[in-house]
Amino acid sequence: VQLIVGNWKMHGTRSRARELAKAIASGKLPAGVMLSVAPPFPFLDAVGQELAGTSIGLAAQTCAVEKEGAFTGEVSAEMLASMGCMQVIVGHSERRALFHETDEVVAKKLRAALRAGINPIVCVGETLAERDAGRHEEVVARQVKAALDGLDAKTLERIVLAYEPVWAIGTGRVATPEQAGAMHARARATVSEVVTPGAAKAVVILYGGSVKPDNMAALAATPGIDGALVGGASLDAKNFLAIAENAVKGEASRKSLETKRT
Ligand code: 13P
């Protein structure tokens, strides 16, 4: 089963968000894919209403570390839970780069989500400079380790990882299936070291960065790629649904290859 998450980032208006959610909810979904969308905070309620009664999940883009208190402008994981959020993205590279979220803060946000009963989607990924310096594997391993250190295999069942190379985000320059596959394998190996081999085998790892309908199938056909975290293309219902459809096709072609090999 492929998981496709739409990260709407800071886009839209209340009415536009409602329209987009309605259009996604009315689409025909193939079997073998799960969808969720992460609208901006102020639109969670409206979008949640449109998604009510569908299988599409409601997610948020970040959360505060603290539960409540004098933290002007912050939104706690408990508040998100009360809005019906099932998932929350933590450690997105935009938050790391623009809002100075360190590995330590990301680890705390992940635990805040768990505390509130929301499942975290933890983003990791290297910058172009880090890749050019040959440090991409080391950076992603460090980010995964920092986020998951101390968690047990049972808790890992609630966590989704997303590999999002910074150089592929919003650039139109998608990682090749080989590049993404290799990094997913590296992230999985780190989960194996930090948690357990069983947790590593089971953990869902999404790819993110310039995912479009026409590159999704090849990504989903790659072993270890369990879905996508989609930015720009998730703002168009047709594209988002086409990505879901192509993810199913890609995974099916992978499975038929695997059957042929064995
Ligand atoms: P784009 O799909 O717009 O490249 O964004 C990816 C992303 O950052 C999703 O979280």
Image: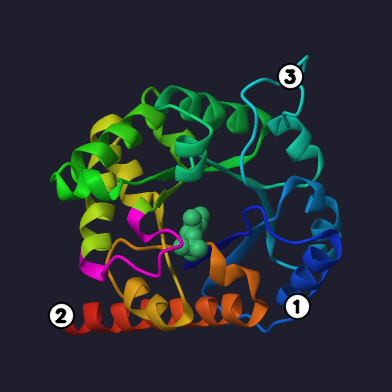
Helix, strand or loop status at disc 2: helix
Identity, as a three-letter code, of the amino acid under mark 2: Arg
* Type of amino acid under label 3: Phe
Query: In terms of sequence position, does the residue under pointer 2 or pointer 3 come before the other?
Result: 3
Q: Position of residue 260 (x, y in %)?
A: 19, 85
- Choose the circle earlier in sequence order: 3 or 1: 1
The residue beneath circle 2 is 261
Mark 1 closeness class: few <14, some 14–19, many ≥20 residues within 10 Å: some
Magenta-tinted stretch: 167-178
Label 2, label 3: how far apart the Cα atoms are: 56 Å
Residue for point 39% across, 31% down: 148
Q: Quadrant of residue 79?
A: top right
- Could you tell me how far apart the alpha carbons at marks 2 and 1 are, in whole angstroms? 40 Å
Position above or below: 91 against 52: above
Left or right of 173 in this view: 193: left
Q: Which mark is residue 23?
A: 1
Residues at circles 2 and 3 in contact by the CB criterion of under 8 Å: no
The numbered disc on residue 226 is none
**Towards the viewer: 211 or 86:** 211
Classify the position of the C terminus by image quarter.
bottom left
- Please state which amino acid type lies under the numbered disc 1: Ala
Callout in the foreground (2, 1): 1
Residue name at image x 78 percent, y 15 percent = 69
Q: 119 left or right of 43?
A: left
Q: Which residue is mark 3?
A: 71
Q: On screen, 23 above or below 43?
A: below
